[in-house]
Image: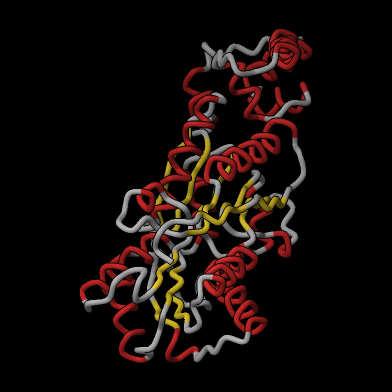
């Protein structure tokens, strides 16, 4: 009698986590099998269903309980709302994970938001399989992230130095890319180059790109006075317009400007033209990111192209491998490309 009662209680209280533990597969894989998602490999489906049959788990009869245990899919936490590169990444990332059978949900936080607190809230209230962080600074993450118990990927910044076991990253070598751009501008005869970027202390890409610029300038013997040749702007055309005017006022002999995003570059082009300067005849302007808009402007934008398709694909593959196969954290740097337009 007691054996029968214990077995009945076990069937009643069995959860997706129990099935995952018994089958050796991740919770996300079990959930997709129970929800008849076709993206699961046949051998995994067979083993999970064998565990379900062994213990008499009845997901339909326990629909309410299952709903309470269900995960919401994948969370995409985006820092800031004006970065055109992020919009491109989101489009490609959502399409890829949906094709793999997952449901992505996008959450925006402001540029001073707390990623750790937000991630903890998501895990408590929404229970995602994993989290993508887009645009976050590595210093925002602490070892407590491992306590969330789910895989995470930082996209557009490198997190290798943090050593957090459940945090992977996919990024471009911003320092090397910025150095390549300054060298190209030098080859085009530019000798007095200004820079437009966010505050290096709050933006990791801005710091890395500035470091690359300074390294190239030092090697090439180019002068650089930070107070006069660096204009602060967040990643928007409006703020870049004002930063370009600042550069003109403080360093009127500039013959080129490197803006740390394509939108910044377009804002700078407009400002220079409004001040009677021709681009590129009087002043060259280069951007960063390689968004499609830059191919249709006059002049076409010279820029560093970040491969958003590859960035998104690798970020998704890394996160899904961690979810489905408990793969360890990976920190990957993808190639960039110098796009020669007409603006330098």
Percent x, y of residue 309: 54, 40
Residue at image coords 48%, 59%: 303
Residue at image coords 54%, 16%: 35
Quadrant, the C terminus:
bottom left
Total labels: the figure holds 0
Q: Is residue 314 visible?
A: yes
Q: Is residue 5 visible?
A: no
Question: Where 253 falls versus 279 (above or below)?
Answer: below
The answer to which quarter of the image holds residue 238 is: bottom left
Scheme of image coloration: secondary structure
Given residues 189 and 267, the one toward you in this image is 189
Residue at image coords 38%, 88%: 253
Given residues 92 and 283, the one toward you in this image is 283
Percent x, y of residue 171: 62, 54
Residue at image coords 40%, 58%: 301
Quadrant, the N terminus:
top right
Percent x, y of residue 136: 53, 60
Given residues 32 and 192, the one toward you in this image is 192
The answer to which quarter of the image holds residue 18 is: top right
Relative to 216, 232 lies left or right = left
Percent x, y of residue 146: 68, 53
Question: Where 263 falls versus 124 (above or below)?
Answer: below
Question: Where 156 falls versus 6 (above or below)?
Answer: below
């Amino acid at each position: 009698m007691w054996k029968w009662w214990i077995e009945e209680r076990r069937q009643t209280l069995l959860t997706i986590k129990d099935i995952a533990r018994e089958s050796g597969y991740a919770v996300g894989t079990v959930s997709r099998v129970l929800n008849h998602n076709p993206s699961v490999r046949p051998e995994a489906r067979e083993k999970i269903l064998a565990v379900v049959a062994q213990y008499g788990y009845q997901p339909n009869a326990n629909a309410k309980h299952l709903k309470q245990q269900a995960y919401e899919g994948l969370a995409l936490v985006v820092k800031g709302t004006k970065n055109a590169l992020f919009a491109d990444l989101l489009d490609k990332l959502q399409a890829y994970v949906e094709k793999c059978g997952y449901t992505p949900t996008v959450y925006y936080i402001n540029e001073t938001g707390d990623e750790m607190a937000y991630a903890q809230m998501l895990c408590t209230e929404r229970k995602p399989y994993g989290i993508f962080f887009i645009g976050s600074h590595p210093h925002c993450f602490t070892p407590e992230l491992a306590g969330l118990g789910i895989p995470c990927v930082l996209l557009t910044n490198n997190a290798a130095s943090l050593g957090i076991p459940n945090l992977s990253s996919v990024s471009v070598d911003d320092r090397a890319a910025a150095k390549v751009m300054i060298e190209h501008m030098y080859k085009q005869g530019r000798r007095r180059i200004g820079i437009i970027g966010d505050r290096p202390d709050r933006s990791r890409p801005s710091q890395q790109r500035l470091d690359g610029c300074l390294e190239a300038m030092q090697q090439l013997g180019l002068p650089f006075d930070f107070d006069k040749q660096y204009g602060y702007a967040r990643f928007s055309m409006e703020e870049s317009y004002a930063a370009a005017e600042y550069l003109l006022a403080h360093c009127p002999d500039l013959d080129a400007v490197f803006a740390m995003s394509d939108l910044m570059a377009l804002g700078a082009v407009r400002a220079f033209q409004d001040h009677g300067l021709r681009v590129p005849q009087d002043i060259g302007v280069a951007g960063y990111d390689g968004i499609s808009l830059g191919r249709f402007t006059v002049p076409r934008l010279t820029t560093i192209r970040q491969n958003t398709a590859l960035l998104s694909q690798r970020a998704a593959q890394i996160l899904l491998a961690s979810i489905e196969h408990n793969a360890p954290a990976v920190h990957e740097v993808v190639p960039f490309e110098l796009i020669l337009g007409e603006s330098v």
